[in-house]
Image: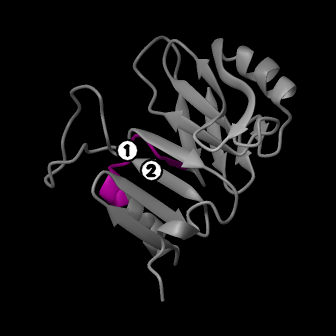
Amino acid sequence: MEIELDPPNGITGFPLGMPAEELKAEAGRLGRIKVSDEGSSARFRYMKVLALHEQFEIVFHLEDGRTLASAEVWIPRPGPEEITVRFRGTDVFRTPARQLLGQFEAMGLTVRDETHYAYVHGLSLGFTRVAGHEVPLDTDGEPLYFQAVLTGPADYYDQSLPKP
């Protein structure tokens, strides 16, 4: 299975703006789904759809309770299926995190690299290196590979840019 990150449009099969009912039906094709706060648009309790595949999870955020606002893909686990998550041909979970950020910078993109998290402005990609289990570590003590990536609308991470 290949999942292509296509910011700010969404991910393979799940365009941003996708209606909730359609999203739940498509997510169900990936595996079991779990819906929380159905239809809610409350600031801290908005609707989420979790797609649970035996080798990975995707969290779909529906901040208005009706349409897909962002999609968060977690690193695939080993198993019977070959699963790759790519951005412009690069496997984002099998490329070391610092190397991947360097590739974004080489593209002329603004990268904000913080402890545990990195944001790519202009692409609306947000990465985390936080792992809830034992993983290989890089020389900086952080996980060698990103553990999750979120893609959202064009201005999703603008708030993390330094103020002029």
Q: Report the residue marked by disc 1.
A: 146
Does any portion of residue 87 appear in the rendered image?
A: yes
The x, y position of residue 76, in whole percent, is 46, 27
* Residue sitting at x 53%, y 24%: 57
Residues rendered magenta in the picture: 90-99
* Residue sitting at x 33%, y 45%: 129
> Could you say which quadrant of the image residue 140 lies in?
bottom left
The x, y position of residue 7, in whole percent, is 67, 55
Q: Are marks 2 and 1 in contact (CB under 8 Å)?
A: yes
> Could you say which quadrant of the image residue 98 lies in?
bottom left
* Residue sitting at x 51%, y 64%: 120
* Residue sitting at x 37%, y 54%: 117
Which of these two is toward me, 93 or 154?
Answer: 154
Does any portion of residue 102 appear in the rendered image?
A: no
Residue 79 part of the magenta segment? no
* Separation of marks 2 and 1 at Cα, in angstroms: 6 Å
Left or right, residue 97 beside residue 137: right
**If you read the primary sequence from the N terminus, does the residue marked by circle 2 or circle 1 appear first?**
2
Residue 127 numbered mark, or none = 2
Q: Residue furthest bottom?
A: 164
Q: Amino acid at mark 1?
A: Phe
Q: Amino acid at mark 2?
A: Phe
Residue 92 part of the magenta segment? yes
Q: Secondary structure at mark 2?
A: strand
The x, y position of residue 86, in whole percent, is 56, 44
Q: Quadrant of the N terminus?
A: top right
The x, y position of residue 126, in whole percent, is 50, 53
| 49 relative to 85, above or below | above
Which of these two is toward me, 144 or 158?
Answer: 158
For disc 1, the neighbor class at 10 Å (few under 14, some 14 to 19, many from 20) is many
